[in-house]
Image (cartoon, rainbow, N blue to C red):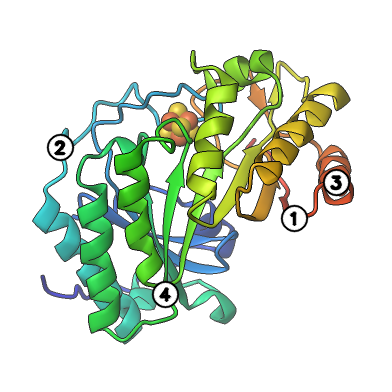
Amino acid sequence: MQAAVWPAEMVTPKHAILSDHARQFDELRFAYPVVSRRSKGLSIGVNVNPDKVCNFHCLYCQVDRRVPPRDRTVDFELMVEEVEFLLGLSQSGQIWQHPRFKGTPLELRRVNDIAFSGDGEPTTYERLGEAIVEVGKLRESQGLTELKLIVITNGSRLGEPEVIRALEGLQAGPYEIWAKLDAGTQAWFEKVDGSGLPLRQIVRNIIAAGQKLDLTIQSLFPTLGGQGPSDEEIGAYIGRLHEMLKAGAKLKLIQVYTTARRPADDSVGVLPDERLDEIVARVRREVPVAVEGFYGRNWE
Ligand code: SF4
């Protein structure tokens, strides 16, 4: 794959760069570059669920399933080739000449990670383990020993031995696993994540994976019809975190955030900064794990 040369006509402003999480980058089908506020740099996303099928139906999901998918299956070799291509562009600095990234501030012009995410649940991709190994080899061959591999998961399959085995491949280098926990009660979980699974099963899954692997808990608290999670809900959520820690799950970080991008569902809103601050402060007080908060952004 050849590095492209881009015309200099349009420079994307900084705020648009940070909100541009489009899954496509020019002609690429499975890999996409994103400048992200969380990674404080460039993240190379790998979409291993191009069919847009997910076993959760989160109200805040940004995947627009009204638009039919371009691909229904992953072309494994092409996916790896695309990641290699983007790594090459980033390493050479050419990526910062692309119209979309030309306005990226200097401090964000660094490659932070390669993230397996997708338009669905990455752990449902049967070749995830192989993909982790292959991408890990690219990291090694390019001497990028500090580059993190990240898997973002809703936790629904984290308890399954073959998924844990696949994720253990991450331990060949720096890695993070971001596991979703958006609720403390079954009722809020069902409302926000649209899953019929018992929340206690998700907690058990996170514990099973967390006993072997370091985890980051990612919690998104939106407003639904103008109402955010109650204090009782946050109390129950903290109870779930305690349950995980007590069972020996290695929780390295808790990320508390709210919606920052336009979801497909109109009833979902942004939690005000003050409420987010309250939740972050309470989790910090009551849970012995580092906590980071991320404010939302109104999209209108
Ligand atoms: S788990 Fe992720 S992809 Fe699936 S519906 Fe929720 S936000 Fe969307």
Q: Position of residue 147 (x, y in %)?
A: 42, 74
Dot placed on the residue nearer the N-terminal end, 3 or 2: 2
Q: Mark 4 points at which residue?
A: 147
How far apart are the two marked residues, 1 and 2, measured between alpha carbons?
Answer: 38 Å
- The residue at which mark 3 appears reads as 277
Question: Where on the picture, by quarter, is residue 1?
Answer: bottom left
Residue beneath the point at 32% across and 50% down: 165
**Type of amino acid under label 4:** Leu
Please indicate, yes or no, whether residue 24 appears anywhere in the rendered image: yes
Badge 4 or badge 3: first in the primary sequence: 4
- Label 3, secondary structure: give it: helix
The residue tagged 1 is 289
In the rendered structure, the answer to whether residue 74 lies left or right of residue 39 reads left
Residue at image point 55% right, 34% down: 262
Left or right of 53 in this view: 266: right
- Give the labeled residue for mark 2: 73
Q: Which amino acid does label 1 sit on?
A: Val
SS for callout 1? loop
Mark 4 vs ligand 1: CB below 8 Å: no
Three-letter amino acid code at the position of disc 3: Asp
Circles 1 and 3: CB atoms closer than 8 Å: no
The residues bearing labels 2 and 4 have C-alpha atoms spaced at a distance of 27 Å
Q: Earlier in the sequence, mark 1 or mark 2?
A: 2
Q: How far apart are marks 4 and 1 (CA)?
A: 24 Å
Front in this rendered view, residue 134 or 100? 134
Q: Nearer the viewer, mark 1 or mark 2?
A: 1
